[in-house]
Image (tube, helix red, strand yellow):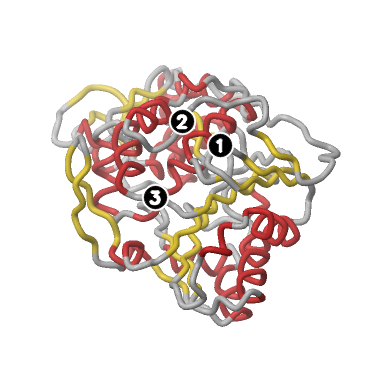
Amino acid sequence: MTEDKILCWYGSDPFEAGQKLMEASDVWKNWSKTESIGLKPNLVVSKKASSGATTHPEFCAGVIAFLQGQGFENLSILEGSWVGDRTERAFRICGYTELAQKYSLPLVDLQKDESVTLEATNGDYRVCQAVLNLDRLINIPVLKGHCQTAMTCALKNLKGCIPDSEKQRYHREGLFQPIADLNEILHADLILVDALEGDPDFEEGGNPQTLNLFMAALDPVLLDSYACSLLGLNIEDVPYITKAAELGAGTIHLKEDTLVPLNKGEGLSSLQRSSLSSTLAAHIHEKGACSACYASLVQALKILQEQGKALPETVMIGQGFKGLTVEGLGFGQCLSGCSSFVPGCPPELSEIVDFLSFTGNKSG
């Protein structure tokens, strides 16, 4: 496989997809059997893959089984869930603790790892040491929507390779440039995408839509550029893609022969991101909000909407409000200076719904 290709395998069997894509990629033929190989799935939150939020463990199992069958023994799975959840809990609930036991390989919790500073064009960034110790990195994201960046796939999945404090910094700085910068200094040796049933709107799932597609690529920018079209987005809707291309992380230019189908592809459909998340986002005044907080607030607004309740005109959220005294509704500990706010980092979803329901009834 070359940098200008995206391999596509269509179907509903994640294990078979993992094996077929690994075999077809050919990249492993140039790897030493003694090299350390790390698999980086998307386990951003402790929810099963059927929710549309996380990488199917069976997909990783197919990759692991193939590599072990070729004689590769130094394998591991690495992840750092988002701020607000614990990686070890995600490993267990998402099926990776059982997976690791079955294939006798370690799970590496990057939330507990040391980190080092690396230099990028636009500044210095911290990356977890365990990732840098690898000889080979396999990036295994889920193709899905995202409340703040419209989409998450190959480029953004590397954000799980940084410490929690750095994740908070990325949100303070607006996500787009830091994500691009991270991909300038950290490169995967292979990208395998789980696009079986991602949620087209929310990174924490809840509305999975079947696409029956798995992909392999070497260029994360090219892959994310194609992924945009599957979600009904333009590249301009996801600014970190172009920014990463400008930093030399890949190309945005798809050609007529970029896509290489490995089978017939029966049942392929487009996820087509709905307008729901953008409609709900209109009620949010956000300044540097972390993913866990932002997604929880969006989910709460969604629940209120489904219940037929009035949505608040504006809810403030994010680190940019920390230490400020402001009038109106606030969400999360950073908004403790707000005249009315929900405490927590992040608050429980039920607490948010109750709070917004009460304030809505009160204002009515």
The earlier-in-sequence mark between 2 and 1 is 1
Q: Which residue is mark 1?
A: 4
**Residue 203 percent across, percent down from the top left:** 52, 41
The picture quadrant where one finds residue 26 is: bottom right
The earlier-in-sequence mark between 3 and 1 is 1
The span from disc 3 to disc 2 (Cα, nearest Å) is: 14 Å
Q: Pick the residue in front: 240 or 82.
A: 240
Q: Pick the residue in front: 319 or 108.
A: 108
The span from disc 3 to disc 1 (Cα, nearest Å) is: 16 Å
**Residue 351 percent across, percent down from the top left:** 44, 44
Q: Amino acid at mark 3?
A: His
**Residue ID at (28%, 33%):** 288
Q: Is residue 227 left or right of residue 134?
A: right
Report the label total.
Answer: 3
**Residue ID at (77%, 32%):** 269
Q: Please identify, in this view, whether the residue under mark 3 or under mark 1 is nearer the observer.
A: 1
Dots 2 and 1: beta carbons under 8 Å?
yes
Which dot marks residue 251?
2
Which dot marks residue 335?
none
Q: Pick the residue in front: 136 or 199.
A: 136
Q: Residue furthest front?
A: 30
